[in-house]
Image (cartoon, rainbow, N blue to C red):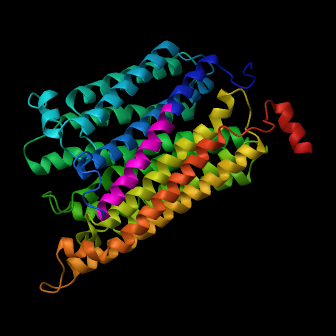
Amino acid sequence: MTNQVLKYKSQSVAKLYFIGAMALFAGQIIFGITLGLQYLIGDLFFPYIPFNIARMVHTNLLIVWLLFGFMGAAYYMVPEEAETELYSPKLAIALFWIFLIAGAATILGYLLVPYARLAEATGNNILATMGREFLEQPLPTKVGIVVVALGFLFNISMTVLKGRKTSISTVLLMGLWGLAIFFLFSFVNPENLVRDKMYWWFVVHLWVEGVWELILASLLAYVLVKTTGVDREVIDKWMYLIIAFALMSGLLGTGHHYFFIGMPGYWLWIGSVFSALEPIPFFLLVLFAYNMVAQRRRNHPNQAAILWAKGTAVVGFLGAGVWGFMHTLAPVNYYTHATQLTAAHGHLAFYGAYVLVVITIISYAMPHLRGRLANSPEAQSMEKKSFWVMTIGMCVMVLALTIAGVMQSYLQRWLPEGQALSYMATQDELRGYYWLRVVGGVVFLIGQFMYFASFFIGGKHVESHADAMALKAA
């Protein structure tokens, strides 16, 4: 079938990235459930998949599939925003396979080779970069990520330079270039533990609470422009307001990771004050999404994409804003740091802010990539149900982890000496909540596969604007 709705042929490369992202997303959740079970059944899959390896795979898959999602989104959005074909579709396709093969080889390395031997075999003695949470990748993989990122940014930047410049593409480029630049700190691994943690947070925090928020805002703005018909000037003003607050609070908010790692005491104040402001951009995101939908000048037939967009704003605010604020002040963080409260915040924040926004752009773009304006009502109904099942599953997990984190803080750290429990004794008290977390993970996995199933549901798809008008009249 001839693609009737895709404006530029080169946008089709995004389809590869979206399919790859969803496949890796499934792997991430399966390993996440494995981790949850290993909390309860300590020797599950041992010695083949020990806990530390399963956790590395889980977190690395999260990062890689989100990067695939961001790259696919850029390849889809930028040609349309720039009103020109992608600078080099062949380069985009080549980088996809390079990134996928390198990522798969790295995961297999984690699973098949003892980590210490993997470090020795991949040159960690030449430049020590391995062994840090989220940045466990061997040196060749890190170098490969930089090469792929530079090729991708060259392709996207050249496309923008030769075409129309919009606020959305500019903010997206700022976020993507920031992502690549801050990743370079993963190559800095000082022997001094305080400096090591400081540079580590330059990558992790300034990604998720800094430049990734620019990507989030641009993706959400693009989908709302397309689905609501609200003037770009209005959406641009909201987007600039959101990213201004995000950068102001997020950059200095890095200080809430410096409370107890040996940094100067003034970070207790800086980290607490600016971290307390971090919910503001996410609250603005909620107002932004719902205001744009309320002011819409068209009823777009892809109502599933609008649901994902509104879900991004609300769940992102709850996870990154409310759950983040719960333990971001230094006097509270003294008791809650590195407890299950941290895990509750991390899961809900990543799901709300980044998982949902990637699914939002996929939900909007994938019908176009398949020659449709929107999927059939039956397919969209399944997609909407998948949103609610995944979100309910995530909420069950997060509430279980939140209660477990509060109990852990009380039993292990708040009670006076002599009454406080040891770490392992505390973990025994939390087993019921850990089982509940597994239940939430299984529900989430069911919702995820419901979402995948929506791609294969037939019915009368909306293939043109004329079809959309006829559907509206009916």
Is 34 covered by the magenta stretch? yes
Query: Is any atom of residue 88 visible in this view?
Result: no
Position above or below: 10 against 276: above
Residue at figure coordinates x 74%, y 20% from the top left: 1
Decide if residue 249 is on the left or right side of residue 368: left
| Coordinates of residue 197 in the picture (x, y in percent) | 18, 49
Position above or below: 296 against 180: below
Q: Tell which of 302 and 100 is nearer to you.
A: 100
Decide if residue 439 is on the left or right side of residue 291: left
- By secondary structure, the bulk of the magenta-drawn segment is best described as helix
| Coordinates of residue 206 in the picture (x, y in percent) | 33, 45
Considering every residue shown, the one lying at the far right of the view is 474
Is 15 covered by the magenta stretch? no
| Coordinates of residue 417 in the picture (x, y in percent) | 12, 84
Position above or below: 47 against 128: below
Q: Tell which of 341 and 43 is nearer to you.
A: 43
Q: Tell which of 78 and 371 is nearer to you.
A: 371
> What is the magenta range?
20-40
Q: Tell which of 429 and 253 is nearer to you.
A: 429
